[in-house]
Image (cartoon, rainbow, N blue to C red):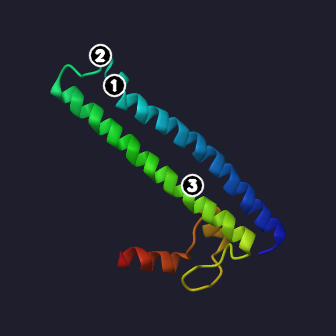
């Protein structure tokens, strides 16, 4: 992989990171708003009906789940940026072979080639 490719991947990773940081901030605000009781629109901060309470709880748990996923992606992006700095970006951590550019374009923070990712997913 040449320096032009590496620079392009760095820019792509930084753009995704910027977008995810905005998403995480929005999701955090949303989760905290729901935790504060604003979501139900009830002045007492308590839903009037058990179904409303269940819906509010589901929405808050779903938001927290999305937040957790986005934070995990941010960690993966940070790892990819570290690999760029260390000169190991684009190499599968399992088999040490080059990760195809098509995979890196689709998932620039991946650590594994398709075959190794599939094997690891099946074993877990």
Per the rendering, the mark at residue 37 is 1
Name the foreground residue: 97 vs 27. Answer: 27
**Image location (x, y in percent) of residue 21:** 59, 44
Quadrant of the snapshot with the C terminus = bottom left
- In the rendered structure, are the residues bearing label 2 and label 1 in contact, judged by CB atoms less than 8 Å apart? yes
Q: Residue at x 44, y 32 (%)?
A: 30
Q: Earlier in the sequence, mark 2 or mark 1?
A: 1
**Image location (x, y in percent) of residue 4:** 83, 66
Question: Is residue 8 shown above or below 19?
Answer: below
Is 94 on the left-hand or right-hand side of 34? right
Q: Earlier in the sequence, mark 1 or mark 3?
A: 1
* Residue 41, quarter of picture: top left
Q: Residue at x 31, y 13 (%)?
A: 43
**Image location (x, y in percent) of residue 121:** 40, 73
Rounded to the nearest angstrom, the CA distance separating label 2 from label 3 is 35 Å
Per the rendering, the mark at residue 74 is 3
Question: To which residue does mark 2 refer?
Answer: 42
Rounded to the nearest angstrom, the CA distance separating label 1 from label 3 is 28 Å
């Amino acid at each position: 992989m040449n320096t032009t490719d590496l620079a392009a991947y760095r820019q792509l990773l930084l753009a995704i990171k910027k977008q995810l940081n905005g998403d995480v901030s929005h999701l955090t605000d949303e989760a905290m708003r729901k935790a504060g009781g604003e979501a139900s629109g009830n002045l007492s901060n308590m839903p009037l009906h058990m179904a409303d309470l269940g819906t509010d709880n589901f929405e808050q748990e779903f938001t927290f789940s999305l937040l957790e996923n986005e934070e995990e992606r941010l960690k993966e992006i940070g790892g990819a940026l570290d690999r760029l700095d260390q000169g190991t970006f684009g190499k599968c951590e399992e088999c040490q072979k080059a990760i195809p550019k098509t995979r890196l374009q689709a998932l620039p923070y991946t650590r594994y080639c398709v075959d190794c990712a599939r094997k690891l997913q099946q074993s877990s």
